[in-house]
Image (cartoon, rainbow, N blue to C red):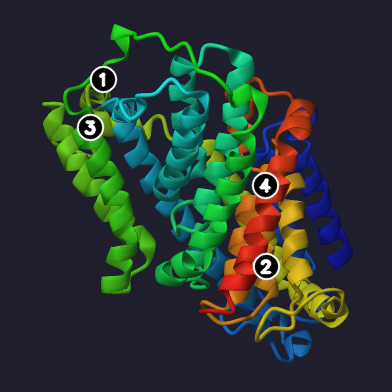
């Protein structure tokens, strides 16, 4: 039965990876393989000799000889445990997405366009790279990429030149997302899973991430495409649609940044802080829009009417629910493999077989090469299940350097292919970037940045 469950996961994983080829949204195979995996576990519960206790991160003793009713109880408790952990991530993401959409409702991101005062291609490259690096650490790499490419489309009229800028934005956004607990889904998973803390994440990964962004941008600035000046047209229509645009931008970004501070002070799960941040932003959004102050209406007709002029309702209707459902499916599917002890056994085999192939991470039996390969793999397959699997594989304590290296590799490794990260996929859709064009023009820059950042991490970890 274990073999069948692994096969279901592999087939589902392939369907997710080949999303663009088979024309099926990745959330569908994620949900199907999650449901089938847990159904097979329930039906074949008597055949499994072991069970993994996620709370204690060890195999449960004597599981094979337990009565069926006790096994069912353990399975239900485990399922509930994983659903709770997954829900923490999803509710957190829902809050962050809604705040970003509220900012966009007031056209807040148009304020960023005002920062660009030069026509030099090289200077504009650095402005966009630095903006992507900083913004992605606050509003996540996917949203930062959407915002900056939208601005790019208004500034750079030549599509051939714009594609180069988009490629460097992808690298910078993924690098920026790695050092912040709210900058990338995988880093958020590690943070909520109590594997990394905000201060240690910054100390360990800011410099490697900065190098990962700066080296490709520096090399690119010498390429012929970034020489000379851009012909930028002044457009009167580019003025913000709302007089509160800059206020909502800074309020929204400040609210999101306050979440790690709230967690540090109260020790409550991050989603609680994110809900408070959303509530505060929603208050100002409703007041500024001069609409009725309400997050929910009991009367459906009144609610529909209110939705037309309520920024909160409008923002909630625009959030990416397919992404939320995808994360639900993939995280619960990985939880199925973890519960059977499959990931634990795989990690044990890695620790025993791989150390001789590379320098071991301090205080662990895991080779640097294993984590680097995880980064390379994240360029080919989705980094969310890779990090979810690592959470089930390794039992190192919070803020062990293993987790920081995982955060860096999974976060930045995806830049090596256009399909390797959410930022890359959305840029591919917005600018119709060809897979092989990116492979030929941008991938080598991303690889250099990834390796340079990894070397920097290996150096900084010896200091802290």
- Cβ–Cβ under 8 Å for marks 2 and 4: no
Identity of the residue drawn at 78% across and 72% down = 342
- Where, by quadrant of the figure, is residue 360 drawn? bottom right
Report the label total: 4
Residue bearing mark 2 = 390
Ranked by sequence position, the earlier of labels 4 and 1 is: 1
State how far apart marks 4 and 1 are (Cα).
34 Å
**Residue 146 percent coordinates (x, y):** 49, 31
For disc 1, the neighbor class at 10 Å (few under 14, some 14 to 19, many from 20) is some
- Where, by quadrant of the figure, is residue 291 drawn? top left
- Cβ–Cβ under 8 Å for marks 3 and 1: yes
As drawn, 254 above or below 428: below
For disc 2, the neighbor class at 10 Å (few under 14, some 14 to 19, many from 20) is many
As drawn, 75 above or below 14: below
Q: Considering the image in quadrants, where does the N terminus appear?
A: bottom right
Residue bearing mark 4 = 414
Mark 2 or mark 4, whichever is nearer to me: 4
Residue bearing mark 1 = 240
Identity of the residue drawn at 55% across and 41% down = 323
Q: Which mark is residue 246?
A: 3
Ranked by sequence position, the earlier of labels 2 and 4 is: 2
For disc 3, the neighbor class at 10 Å (few under 14, some 14 to 19, many from 20) is some
């Amino acid at each position: 039965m274990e073999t069948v469950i692994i096969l279901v996961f592999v087939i589902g994983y392939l369907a997710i990876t080949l999303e663009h080829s088979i024309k099926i949204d990745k959330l569908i195979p994620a949900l199907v393989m999650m449901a089938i995996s847990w159904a097979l576990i329930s039906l074949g519960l008597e055949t499994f000799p072991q069970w993994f206790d996620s709370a204690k991160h060890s195999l449960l003793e004597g599981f094979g000889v337990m009565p069926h009713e006790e096994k069912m109880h353990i399975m239900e408790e485990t399922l509930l445990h994983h659903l709770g952990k997954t829900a923490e991530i999803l509710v957190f993401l829902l809050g962050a997405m809604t705040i970003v959409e509220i900012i966009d409702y007031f056209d807040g991101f148009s304020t960023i366009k005002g920062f660009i005062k030069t026509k030099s291609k090289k200077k504009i490259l650095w402005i966009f790279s630095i903006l992507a690096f900083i913004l992605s650490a606050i509003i996540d790499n996917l949203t930062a990429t959407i915002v900056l490419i939208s601005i790019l489309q208004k500034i750079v009229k030549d599509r051939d030149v714009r594609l180069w800028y988009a490629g460097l934005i992808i690298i910078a956004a993924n690098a920026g997302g790695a050092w912040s607990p709210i900058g990338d889904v995988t880093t958020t998973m590690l943070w909520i899973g109590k594997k990394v803390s905000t201060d240690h994440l910054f100390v360990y990964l800011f410099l490697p991430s900065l190098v990962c962004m700066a080296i490709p941008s520096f090399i690119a600035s010498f390429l012929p495409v970034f020489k000379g000046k851009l012909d930028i047209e002044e457009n009167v229509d580019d003025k913000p649609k709302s007089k509160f645009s800059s206020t909502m931008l800074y309020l929204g970004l400040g609210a999101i940044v306050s979440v790690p501070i709230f967690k540090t002070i109260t020790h409550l799960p991050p989603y609680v802080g994110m809900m408070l941040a959303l509530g505060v932003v929603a208050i100002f959004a409703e007041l500024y829009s001069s609409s009725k102050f309400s997050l929910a209406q009991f009367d459906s007709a009144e609610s529909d009417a209110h939705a037309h002029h309520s920024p909160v309702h409008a923002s909630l209707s625009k959030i990416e629910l397919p992404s939320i459902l995808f994360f639900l499916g993939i995280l619960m599917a990985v939880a199925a493999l973890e519960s059977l002890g499959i990931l634990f056994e795989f990690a044990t085999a890695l620790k025993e077989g791989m150390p001789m192939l590379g320098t071991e991470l301090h205080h662990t039996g895991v080779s640097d090469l294993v984590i680097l390969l995880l980064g390379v793999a994240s360029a080919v397959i989705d980094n969310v299940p890779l990090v979810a699997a690592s959470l089930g594989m390794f039992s190192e304590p919070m803020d062990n350097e293993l987790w920081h290296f995982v955060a860096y590799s999974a976060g930045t490794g995806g830049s090596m292919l256009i399909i390797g990260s959410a930022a890359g996929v959305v840029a591919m859709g917005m600018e119709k970037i060809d897979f092989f064009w990116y492979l030929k023009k941008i991938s080598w820059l991303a690889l250099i940045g990834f390796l340079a950042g990894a070397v920097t991490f290996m150096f900084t970890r010896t200091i802290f």
